[in-house]
Amino acid sequence: MKAVAIEFTTNMFGTLPDYIKSSLYNYLEFPTQDHWSEIHSTVISNTGKMQTVWQAVVAVDIRYGASPITDCNDNVLWPNLPTPEVLIKAINNVVFSNLNLN
């Protein structure tokens, strides 16, 4: 798997807490509906423009921009889950673009 810049990712409070980093790594290993629901709204940055993980993914591939639906049991279902490779690219784009390295 390609290297991901999670360790260099920040949010409006500074360095990402370990539980958020763990959630991101967990999705990379097990990309499921529940894991995506957990991380999609995480705000990421690196001393620059902040955006959610979902916004970063959509910037890489618009196919993941569809909003989730809720079934009759109030379960949130995402029509498309980003692949781990797309998530890695999205996070790296946010981190390295904000450092002006891209």
Image: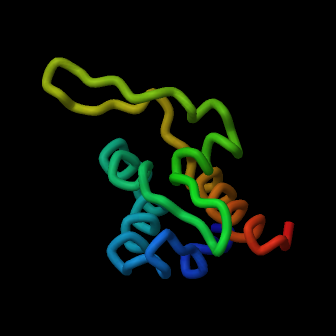
User: Residue 95 at x, y = what percent?
Assistant: 68, 69
User: Residue 69 at x, y = what percent?
Assistant: 34, 24
As displayed, is residue 38 above or below residue 70?
below
Figure quadrant of residue 39: bottom left
Q: Which residue reaches farthest top? A: 72
Q: Residue at x 13, y 25 (%)?
A: 73
Badge count: 0
Image check: 59 left or right of 20?
right
Q: Quadrant of the N terminus?
A: bottom right
Image check: 82 left or right of 77?
right
User: Residue 42 at x, y = what percent?
Assistant: 43, 57
Q: Residue at x 49, y 39 (%)?
A: 81
Q: Which residue reaches farthest left? A: 73
Figure quadrant of residue 85: bottom right
Q: Residue at x 53, y 74 (%)?
A: 10
Image check: 26 left or right of 94?
left
Image check: 94 left or right of 29?
right
Figure quadrant of residue 21: bottom left
Q: Quadrant of the C terminus?
A: bottom right
As displayed, is residue 91 above or below residue 65?
below
